[in-house]
Amino acid sequence: MKVLTKYTLISVLKVGFATALLAALMLVGVDLFSNLDSYIGHSLGFGKAFMLSMLYYPEAFLIALGPSFLFSATYFLSMLNASNEMICILNSGVSSRRVVTPLLILAVMLALFYFGFNETIAIKSSNLKDSRTQFATSDSSLDNTDIALSDMQDGYMVYASRYEDETSTLYNVSYIELSGKSGEKDSIPDSSSNADSNANSGTGLRRIDAYKAVYNEAEGFWTFNDCYVYTTKQTHDGETVDVSYLGMLDVERMKLEPQLFRNLSSEISKMSLDLAHAYLLRMKGLNPDEYARLGTEYYKRIFSCLTPLIMMVIACSMNYRFKKNVLFFSLICSICIAVVYYVIQMMTVMLADQGVIAPWLGILIPFAVILGLSGIMSIIMK
């Protein structure tokens, strides 16, 4: 029994890891050629461009891991049947379940390996690639456009047409107070006129339109430049609106950190887990629409380690009793089921991104469907 288990594990591991390493190298080549125009445009030598692409190798290896072990397990089991080794195993009193059990245990171990490798190596390597690429090409992937955030706790909303991460600056900013709360007074330069001091009264709602707003890191608030301040006031004749111009205005009430304005469509998958979870909770209150997309990316990072497990389950549930071309038909069937899995995942992720279903459901539904399908197939094909 130990000999059979050893033979099974060594055969599958050898083919699986070899396939994953070669497939990852192909993905690195795709990454290199997809960024070749940018590298050439910034006069990067081939050696530096190749090294930047190789930093993508750990992530590419994880992408290739699941399909590679699907191929490896399918190849091993189909060859057992094609060479009549399975007949010898069954005639010796060993059930087919005994052959499959080590593969399922290996699948669980691969899932744990995937998660640990991703958190300790792949994410760090990907972050290093992004930072070095940004330094070499002077392009920041964290700049963002068309941003809208609302802080209901402090009662204000912020709109900006562009955010520049290098200088922590918002451009074409509109700041709107949703309540008359005035617990903190904004600082106005001494050179401002008496009419401008109405913006500091806190007696009504305000709107500030500014050319730009720069984050004051030492004080923890934003400084607006070239801004028009619209303040509502209650008078005997009703509600009036005062308009004033200020060259500079410190809005101490606006304490949103600059990273909340960044383009983090993929960055949440590269943060530490604690930071990603805290950021996700903050975005849930500030921007519910953005939360759906970021939540999907977060749960995809958590549960993507189950991909090798699902691929191995697919391989173990296949019927390898074809009379001819066992390897060919086995691979075709397993690939078809894998395609179904990825199509379902694509559809559920789209629904989760749009907030139709919960983010965690968008990731777990494909796993549940394929597990159910594999269980049905294993029962039917007995």
Image (cartoon, rainbow, N blue to C red):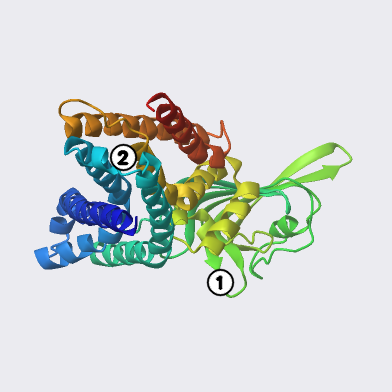
In the rendered image, which quarter is residue 200 located in?
bottom right
In the rendered image, which quarter is residue 379 located in?
top left
**Kind of residue at disc 1:** Glu
Classify 344 as above or below 3.
above
Left or right of 278 in this view: 116: left
Q: Which mark is residue 217?
A: 1
Q: Closest to the observer: 99 or 249?
A: 99
Q: Closest to the observer: 81 or 169?
A: 81
**Kind of residue at disc 2:** Leu
Is residue 56 visible in the rendered structure shown here?
A: no
Q: Residue at x 15, y 26 (%)?
A: 324
- Label 2 CA crowd tier, 10 Å (few <14, some 14–19, many 20+): few
Residue at numbered disc 2 = 90
Residue 365 position, x and y percent, is 51, 35
Q: Residue at x 75, y 63 (%)?
A: 184
Q: Gap between marks 1 and 2, in whole Å? A: 71 Å
